[in-house]
Amino acid sequence: MGMKAIMVGGTTSSAGKSLLVTALCRILAKRGYEVAPFKAQNMSLNSFVTKKGKEIAIAQAMQAFAAGIEPDERMNPILLKPKGNFVSQLIVLGEAIGDIDSREYYKMVPKLRKVVEKAYEELAEEYEIVVIEGAGGMAEINLYDRDLSNIHIARYAKPSILIIGDIDRGGVFASLYGTYKLLPDDIRNLVVGFVINRLRGYKEFLYDGVEKLEALCKVPVLGIIPFLDSELPSEDSLNIEEWKGSGLIGIVRLPRISNFTDFEPLRRIARFVELKEKPDCEILVIPGSKDTIADLKVLKSMPIYEQIMRFAGKKPIIGICGGYQMLGKELVDFGVEHGVEKVKGLGLLEAETRFEKYKKRTVQVSKKVTGDAEIIRSIKGETVWGYEIHKGITSSKRPIFEDDGCQSEDGMCWGTYLHGLFWNENLIRAVEKYLGVRLEFKNQFDFLAEEVEKNLKLDLLFSQIPSG
């Protein structure tokens, strides 16, 4: 067997861990290695459904695709989907277990350690190298006894560790130094290099600092990565602030928004709109929600509601998953999310949703476009791919993707359960045709791999990885 494991730990959340793991998976796969990504526990608003119907964080799914393999629930054995008030939905090996608060979760950590170890062990047996992604900041000293994603997996797998810091936030040398020094001795000894990410200026201005950091820590800075205009799916709502598209498409920023990565391919022409806004856009989208009824109630009390009603019949309104449920006439909760209650929807679609069981539907699907709603009518008869992750069953009068979704009588409003819909090239082309724009695409995996290869001392990194 060849190389064993690399781990990318960060100084903070959104330091660039997912990006670097994705690039390393692509680079190693292109060099002929059988490589798999791994993140012990992820907290993410955005998830993906595998071919086996298992739910994992979208970052690990993309990393698997970068490695040229199918996403697998073992690559992200524990997923927490935050719902607010310290409560998250807990997903173990791709299956939703239930809603849990942070104190209950910490009590489960001893059992979950075994799940993490088994998942990692199986991947390490099947692949030549596993690229591990840490979570948040690596040196959360208040969590060391229960930190599955950083300290525990580092002790268990003994990988060669890279620590990545984001210079765009400022204080990158202090955060790299502080993270390194706060690590327990046995973990610190596994660190083989630092990486500085998101540089917008000139590298030579950093060289003095690099030399001083290397002298203080006796650890090399293996690379300085420039600020990359990547369109990889984002992990959490922090990344929403980075969307600065033209605004032809407005995406309603629901309080409990989920799977907003559905719209990444459109981000050059899309922006998130706040509930207090009355956006001036050509297409309005209501995205997924972790709590449809709660978000619907908030939406109906805000200025955006008036704009939705003003849009109706004049410009396209699209609902995805929770957004689709909201566009219907009625939502009935039989005690699954809250108490038993019946709530009026926005009334723009002949559809009704019932929440009768906690059980979620998680499945990958391919469907033919059968509706003739605005935008999709230009690809009627063609096939689209997507995945469903939802509670509740919706009955509708005018489905648009075979048995899925619904459209209004005039075709100006439509909804669907299909996440990932805008990752279909034919649907992107249909949006372009409707708006009269052209979106440029590049292979994100190859783009990231090329940039990292240019800016990281990979031979030095790979030479420091022990054989398995």
Image: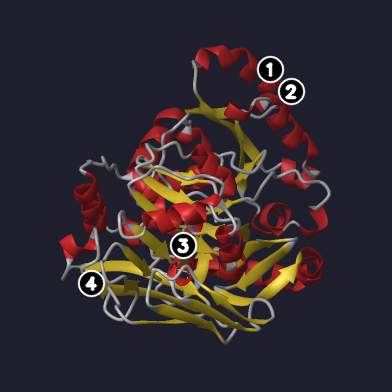
Query: Sequence-wise, which precedes: disc 4 or disc 3?
Result: 3
Cα distance between the residues tagged 1 and 3: 38 Å
Circle 1 Cα neighbour tier, 10 Å, few/some/many (<14 / 14–19 / ≥20): few
Q: Quadrant of the C terminus?
A: bottom right
Tell us which disc is closer to us: 4 or 1: 4
Residue to which mark 3 is pinned = 127
Query: Sequence-wise, which precedes: disc 3 or disc 2?
Result: 3
Residue at x 43%, y 56% (from the top left corner): 308
Picture disc at residue 212 = 1
- 424 vs 201, left or right, is left
Circle 4 Cα neighbour tier, 10 Å, few/some/many (<14 / 14–19 / ≥20): many
As drawn, 335 above or below 47? below
Cβ atoms at labels 2 and 1 below 8 Å apart: yes
Tell us which disc is closer to us: 1 or 3: 1
Can residue 7 be seen in this snapshot?
no
Instruction: Classify mark 4: helix, strand or loop.
Output: loop
**Which amino acid type is shown beneath numbered disc 4?**
Gly
